[in-house]
């Protein structure tokens, strides 16, 4: 219904790319270089996505703190800027139709495109980390803290605790040390048995040695800086205090290691246990999704070029399954050449020649993944929380309430909405979707695939009726 | 404990951004520009951006990338703005978002059939 409201004003273009991270920038660059009329739409006011956020504005000092992998995004952004693709900044896409109509909101006004091909590059978001107290002011994701560093040069005012697992957590710690920011503690949930499980993938990891040695160097920097480090942390819980102004906020992290109880005070507690694909668009498109048991998330089904089972719509980068920034840029280029060939801008011989080189590099970039997925597989207890823990932050629904819904006959996430408003707040299930799926699957003793995911509907970002009516 | 609520984030020494004046809940604040409203408020010592409609619990930015909607505030009279997605400008009048709003993010939050109910229509 909403689509028809605005479709008469839709601007016809060859390619619309959504998301200005490495995948989106590379896809738009390749399509535009083939001579296609290409628009890249992104919510931010500058290209880079989350991984290269603020890359155009960062001075030498900030680039030095953030490290060479961040600085590498500059070349991708420059190539994009020179490609001839149009960059629509500060625009939020709230609907993509199966007929490739795109509706977006910019400066309070609605605009539309009618595209021959669409490339979705909306990337990843951090996996929910539902522990007691994770809703308190002062608890942020490690990614959020990194965005504050990249985009605003801001760091915690007092030494923070970094808790959880995964490369981003250690990278942020390394960046803080370089910025001269003391860290109260690194509380790692990774266990030794995880390390053994990961050893099965050691051979493939060895072939990705440059990546692995970088990771070891991060950890060494933290150790040498004297950051207190805890391993195999369990029973994480954020404690709170109420200030003189009446605001309750985080004040300490409690946890256990091998049965020993710990409690460390900090005002800022940064959580992270990996990233998962942002599937809002592909879910809303009713594309087929599969449960990935290695990455513990839903991923859209695509062909070798990234095309969904919705013709003409592609997905590139972490939105198709977590592969990291390097892989994302290559997948973006692959989708770009595929689209260029489909629209007749290049011939299939040229496409296949380019694809061969891209796929070879992609295989290299993805070599480390099985090892990382295994080593940093978030533990069950940190994904399927105990009863007291809030699962749906918006509507404050706990895991215990969710389990009660199941007892009463709730079989999946969509019914959980009507049982108790779970997933119906403004975040539209982004913060609880995977947790709800896994809690229900666990309670019903069936697979997450059988339980499925929230049925996502447009507008995938909240919109006021006034905006919709074009007031 | 009666110590006041701590400032959560601060700019690195020498960080760029000219000082600008804004208002938060009618209190004048001097913040650095060239950043999101959320980043500016965090560095200005704000740690309660909104209260939940359900229990009134305090909330503050969690994801900083437009996904969690914990940083919702009212900006220049418009409620339910994602403060992590809006650049701070001189003279902005920002208010914490207290519970449910009259003009909520409305139609993206329904269950079955896109009913146009208030997101927190209780």
Image (tube, rainbow, N blue to C red):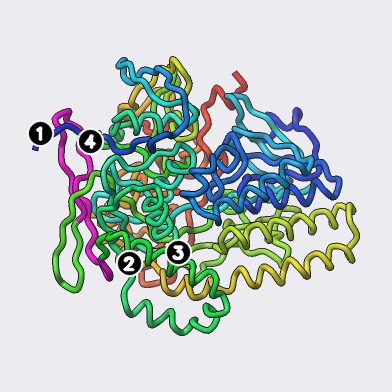
- Could one spot residue A15 in this view of the protein? yes
The crowd level at tag 1 (other Cα within 10 Å; few <14, some 14-19, many 20+) is: few
Tell me how far mark 3 sits from mark 2, CA to CA.
11 Å
Count of number-bearing discs: 4
Tell me how far mark 4 sits from mark 1, CA to CA.
11 Å
Which residue in the structure is indicated by mark 4?
A: B6
Which residue in the structure is indicated by mark 1?
A: B2
Q: Chain of mark 3?
A: A
Instruction: Please name which of the two marks, 4 or 2, marks the residue nearer to the observer.
Output: 4
Q: Quadrant of residue B121?
A: top left
- Disc number for residue A309: none
Q: Left or right of B63: which side holds A5?
A: right
Residue A287: percent from left, percent from top? 63, 57
Which residue in the structure is indicated by mark 2?
A: A443
* Secondary structure that dominates the magenta span: strand
The crowd level at tag 2 (other Cα within 10 Å; few <14, some 14-19, many 20+) is: some
Up the image or down, A77 lies above or below A403; here it is above
The answer to whether mark 3 and mark 2 are in CB contact below 8 A is: no
Residue A349 covered by magenta stretch: no
Nearest the camera: A25 or A278? A25
Q: Chain of mark 1?
A: B
Quadrant position of the N terminus of chain A in the picture:
top right
Q: Quadrant of residue B82?
A: top left
Q: Earlier in the sequence, mark 3 or mark 2?
A: 2
The answer to whether mark 4 and mark 2 are in CB contact below 8 A is: no
Secondary element under disc 3, as helix, strand or loop, is helix
Which residue in the structure is indicated by mark 3?
A: A451
Tell me how far mark 2 sits from mark 1, CA to CA.
42 Å
Q: Same chain for labels 2 and 1? Say yes or no.
A: no
Magenta stretch? A230-253
């Amino acid at each position: 219904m909403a689509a028809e409201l605005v479709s008469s004003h839709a601007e016809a273009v060859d390619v619309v790319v959504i998301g200005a991270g490495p995948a989106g920038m590379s896809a738009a660059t390749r399509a535009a270089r083939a001579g296609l009329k290409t628009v890249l739409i992104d919510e931010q006011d500058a290209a880079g996505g989350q991984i290269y956020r603020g890359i155009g504005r960062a001075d030498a000092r900030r680039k030095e703190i953030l490290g060479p992998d961040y600085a590498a995004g500059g070349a991708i952004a420059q190539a994009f800027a020179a490609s001839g693709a149009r960059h629509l900044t500060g625009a939020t896409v709230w609907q993509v139709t199966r007929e490739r109509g795109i509706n977006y909101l910019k400066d309070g006004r609605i605009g539309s495109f009618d595209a021959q091909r669409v490339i979705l590059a909306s990337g990843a978001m951090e996996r929910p980390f539902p522990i007691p107290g994770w809703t308190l002011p002062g608890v942020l994701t490690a990614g959020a803290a990194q965005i504050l560093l990249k985009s605003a040069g801001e760091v915690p005012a007092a030494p923070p605790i970094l808790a959880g697992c995964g490369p981003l957590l250690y990278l942020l710690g390394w960046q803080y040390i370089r910025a001269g920011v003391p860290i109260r503690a690194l509380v790692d949930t990774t266990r030794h048995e995880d390390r053994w499980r990961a050893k099965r993938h050691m051979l493939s990891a060895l072939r990705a040695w440059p990546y692995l040695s970088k990771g070891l160097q991060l950890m060494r920097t933290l150790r040498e800086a004297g950051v207190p480090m805890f391993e195999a942390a369990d029973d994480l819980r954020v404690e709170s205090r109420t200030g003189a102004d009446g605001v309750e906020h985080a004040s300490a992290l409690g946890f256990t290691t091998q049965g020993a109880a710990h409690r460390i005070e900090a005002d800022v507690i940064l959580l992270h246990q990996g990233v998962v694909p942002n599937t809002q668009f592909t879910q809303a498109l009713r594309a087929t999704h599969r449960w990935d048991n290695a990455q513990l998330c839903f991923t859209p089904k695509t062909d070798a070029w990234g095309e969904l089972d919705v013709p003409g719509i592609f997905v590139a980068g972490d939105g198709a399954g977590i592969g990291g920034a390097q892989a994302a840029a290559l997948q973006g280029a692959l989708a770009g050449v595929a689209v260029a060939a489909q629209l007749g801008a290049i011939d299939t011989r040229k496409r296949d020649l380019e694809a061969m080189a891209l796929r070879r590099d992609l295989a290299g970039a993805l070599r480390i993944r099985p090892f990382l997925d295994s080593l940093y597989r978030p533990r069950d207890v940190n994904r399927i929380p105990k009863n007291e823990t809030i699962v749906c932050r918006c509507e404050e629904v706990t895991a215990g309430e969710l389990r009660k819904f199941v007892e009463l006959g709730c079989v999946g996430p969509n019914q959980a909405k009507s049982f108790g408003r779970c997933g119906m707040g403004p975040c539209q299930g982004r913060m609880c979707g995977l947790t709800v799926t896994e809690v229900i699957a666990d309670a019903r003793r069936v697979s997450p695939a059988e339980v499925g995911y929230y049925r996502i509907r447009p507008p995938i970002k909240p919109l006021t009726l006034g905006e919709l009516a074009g007031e | 404990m009666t110590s006041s609520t701590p400032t959560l984030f601060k700019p690195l020494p020498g960080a760029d951004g000219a000082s600008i004046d804004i208002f938060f809940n009618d209190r004048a604040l001097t913040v650095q520009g060239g950043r999101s409203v959320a980043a500016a408020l965090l560095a200005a010592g704000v740690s309660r951006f909104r209260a939940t409609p359900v229990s009134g619990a305090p909330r503050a930015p969690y994801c900083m990338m437009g996904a969690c909607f914990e940083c919702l505030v009212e900006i220049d009279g418009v409620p339910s703005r994602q403060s992590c997605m809006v650049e701070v400008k001189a003279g902005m009048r920002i208010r914490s978002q207290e519970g449910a709003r009259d003009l909520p993010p409305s139609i993206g939050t329904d269950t079955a059939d896109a009913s146009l109910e208030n997101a927190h229509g209780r």
